[in-house]
């Protein structure tokens, strides 16, 4: 900084330096306020509680409304309900989906789920084990060996062979009676 021999602290450079110092100090106080960890923790705790309380409550599903959906709408319905309980839901393409209709990851725990949805026009026909084949293929395709696998249908039930295979592979089956409470607790 240059100081004028005649003007001293009143020189242009000194005045400009003083002005810049005051602005810098003001900027720091405005943009980076003093830290009060206790107050900040209390604020976050209060606001996180408000966010949790504001989370939408899921109404029981209306089976007749689900029956009126087309297969893509049913997939969207399943994924939206999972998103409401904390999952990031990625829908797979309608073709070349690798056996999955949706890939889910929980925002907090990071747990992963692969879902396969089978929407039936004839709700009285049992859902066959195509869903099992699709999910096993998806686990490999998406390199998600630790992901939970879930098959959902609006049909009244899955075929007995499908239930046996699901048990062998640890796949969760959700048929029409369980859809009303979907998603189930503990996912």
Image (cartoon, helix red, strand yellow):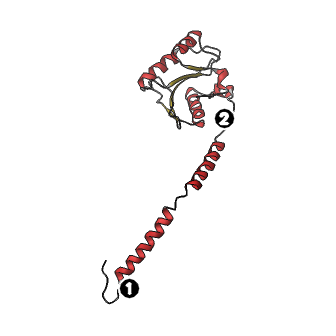
Q: Residues within 10 Å of mark 2 (few under 14, many from 20)?
A: few
Instruction: Say which of 109 and 178 sits in front.
Output: 109
Name the N-terminal-most of marks 2 and 1: 1
Would you identify the image quadrant in which residue 163 lies?
Answer: top right
Q: Position of residue 90 (x, y in %)?
A: 49, 34
x and y percent of residue 115 in the render?
53, 26
> Label 1, on which residue?
10
The quadrant in which residue 137 appears is: top left
C-alpha distance separating marks 2 and 1: 70 Å
Give the residue number, with chain letter if any, for mark 2.
Answer: 58
Number of disc labels: 2
Picture disc at residue 56: none
Q: Residue furthest top?
A: 161
Q: Nearer the viewer, residue 58 or 169?
A: 169
As helix, strand or loop, the secondary structure at mark 1 comes to loop
Query: Which image quarter is the N terminus in?
Result: bottom left
**Which quadrant: the C terminus?**
top right
Nearer to us in this view, 122 or 25: 25
In the image, residue 61 lies at what x, y percent? Answer: 67, 29
The residue located at (48%, 28%) in the rendering is 94
Is 143 located above or below residue 46 in the figure? Answer: above
Q: Position of residue 37 (x, y in %)?
A: 55, 54
Q: Give the camera-side residue of 40 and 135.
A: 40
**Contact, CB < 8 Å: mark 2 with mark 1?**
no
Element at label 2: loop
Classify 156 as above or below 4.
Answer: above
Q: Label 1 neighbourhood size at 10 Å, few (<14), some (14-19), many (20+)?
A: few
Q: Is residue 179 left or right of residue 106?
A: right
Q: Nearer the viewer, mark 2 or mark 1?
A: 1
> Relative to 106, is 124 on the left or the right?
right
């Amino acid at each position: 900084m240059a100081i004028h021999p005649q003007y001293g602290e009143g020189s242009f450079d000194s005045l400009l330096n003083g002005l810049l110092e005051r602005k810098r100090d003001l900027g720091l106080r405005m943009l980076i306020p003093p830290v009060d960890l206790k107050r900040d923790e209390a604020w976050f705790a209060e606001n996180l509680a408000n966010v949790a309380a504001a989370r939408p409550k899921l109404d029981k599903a209306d089976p007749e409304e689900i029956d009126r959906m087309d297969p893509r709408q049913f997939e969207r319905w399943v994924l939206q309900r999972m998103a409401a309980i904390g999952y990031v839901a990625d829908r797979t393409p309608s073709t070349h989906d690798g056996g999955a209709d949706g890939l889910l990851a929980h925002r907090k725990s990071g747990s992963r789920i692969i879902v396969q949805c089978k929407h039936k026009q004839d709700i009285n026909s049992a859902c066959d084990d195509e869903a099992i084949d699709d999910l096993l293929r998806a686990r490999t395709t998406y390199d998600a060996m630790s992901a939970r696998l879930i098959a959902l249908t609006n049909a009244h039930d899955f075929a007995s062979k499908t239930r046996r295979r699901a048990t062998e592979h640890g796949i969760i089956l959700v048929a029409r009676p369980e859809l009303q409470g979907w998603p189930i607790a503990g996912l």
